[in-house]
Amino acid sequence: MSSPRTVAFHTLGCKLNFAESSTLARGLEEAGYARVRPEDRPDLFVLNTCSVTENADRECRQWVRRFQRINPEAFVAVVGCYAQLKPDEIAAIPGVDLVLGANEKFDLAAHIDAADGKRPGGVAVHGPIKEVRAFHPSWNSGDRTRTFLKVQDGCDYFCSFCTIPLARGRSRSGTVADTVAIAERIAASGVKEIVLTGVNTGDFGRSHGEDFLGLVEALDRVEGIARFRISSIEPNLCTDAIIRFVAGSRRFAPHFHMPLQSGSDALLERMRRRYDTALYADRVRAIKALMPHACVGADVITGTPGETDEEFIRTHTFLRSVPVDHLHVFTYSERANTTAVRMDETVPMEMRRERTKQLRILGSKLQRAHGERHLGTVRPVLFEAEETDGRMLGFTDNYIRVSVPYDPAWVNAVVPVSMDRIDGEGHVTGSRTAPALSAKAYGEGMAPALAPSPAA
């Protein structure tokens, strides 16, 4: 490709992918590329794929066709989880020039330069996932308010339904010192919230004698960041020590997202999860005992092989018996090379989708109840820059979406807001009650304690 060179990214899947896309983009910018929007007809398109979606192949083909329509002469590179799992199939898609595996994608600029302006025509460069050992820290940039920071990658759990260990390899992470240095760099850019993300975040540091508690203790001392948020943590790794630290920390938000997947112990065992419902319920109640105002979220999968009506009802009942506040509900889809795909008693897709619908209805009720419990209190809200119909949005520390009249002075500021009512969009509307908060004032808390509510 001739200079000047331009690149556009499209990212599918999780926040981890978005963090990595941003890091890959910075690497290309350092190599002389200018990042542009896809509609600007770039010289290079990079598609960062996901393996979680049941339509990974179809989505990949659709985006490649879109790239070709925008600029038929553009070079198309495909990276990400699906690229590691199915490199040769992706390389055979018309219009794809280069496919890079889990380790190779971090040398994206070098691999593109090696093509030397030629259209190689579907070359796949990848190695065995078991040989991937390096950890590449990643974080997204361009959003002044919130950054997703990858602190861990890969997974050693090998759950029966999941391809992530096959796509990302074994669990690995950087050191506490390296991660803190990145957080300080992000703080210097003006970002106020860092979300810690990973495949199995709570497994941080195990390979080099550190742990996740040590990381959060060190990050809590980083000046300039108003809040850290833990994106997800396995219930068996969400220890009492971590819960106690978050409850008393200056900067860590009272928000825990713990994957559940099923409320049936028999199904959890078939999934090869490392906990049962008793442990899960104990972790949720431990959080609420110290932080009644905390938000607890859960991931749930419907329709895994062999899930009976009784097991689904048990999941629905369990979710109403523990004080969780919002749900991410996924419909099971078959994944090649997983144990679950070889199991008998496949659940019909129509039944899977109906169960997903029922749990999403429950999730909406739980989320609304979480907001209603905080009406009449004051919570710190970090506001975002977008303005829609004269209003702006932000999240409280405990993950309630808040809408107020737009005020440019509130952008990227932590503002104490009186929680007044819930609007038709499900947002809490409110009004400012005092000057914007410093990180220290935010950390000290500002709302009266709330008693845990009965199940919805």
Image (cartoon, rainbow, N blue to C red):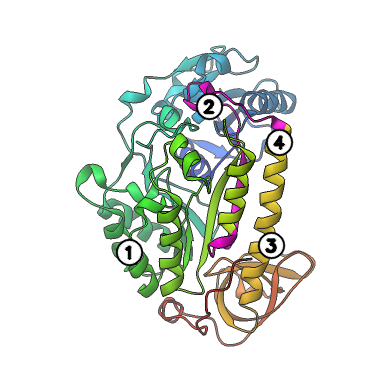
Residue occupied by mark 3: 365
Q: What is the CA distance from the residue labelled 1 to the residue labelled 3?
A: 28 Å
Amino acid beneath label 3: Lys
Q: The C terminus lies in which quarter of the figure?
A: bottom right
Front-most of residues 436 and 56: 56
Q: What is the CA distance from the residue labelled 4 to the residue labelled 3?
A: 22 Å
* Image: magenta residue range: 320-349
Question: Which label's residue is closer to the chain start, 4 or 1?
Answer: 1
Q: Is residue 94 visible?
A: yes
Quarter of the image holding residue 145?
A: bottom right
Dots 4, 3 in contact, CB < 8 A: no
* Label 2, residues with CA under 10 Å away: few <14, some 14-19, many ≥20: many
Amino acid beneath label 1: Asp
Residue occupied by mark 1: 240
Residue occupied by mark 4: 351
Residue occupied by mark 2: 82
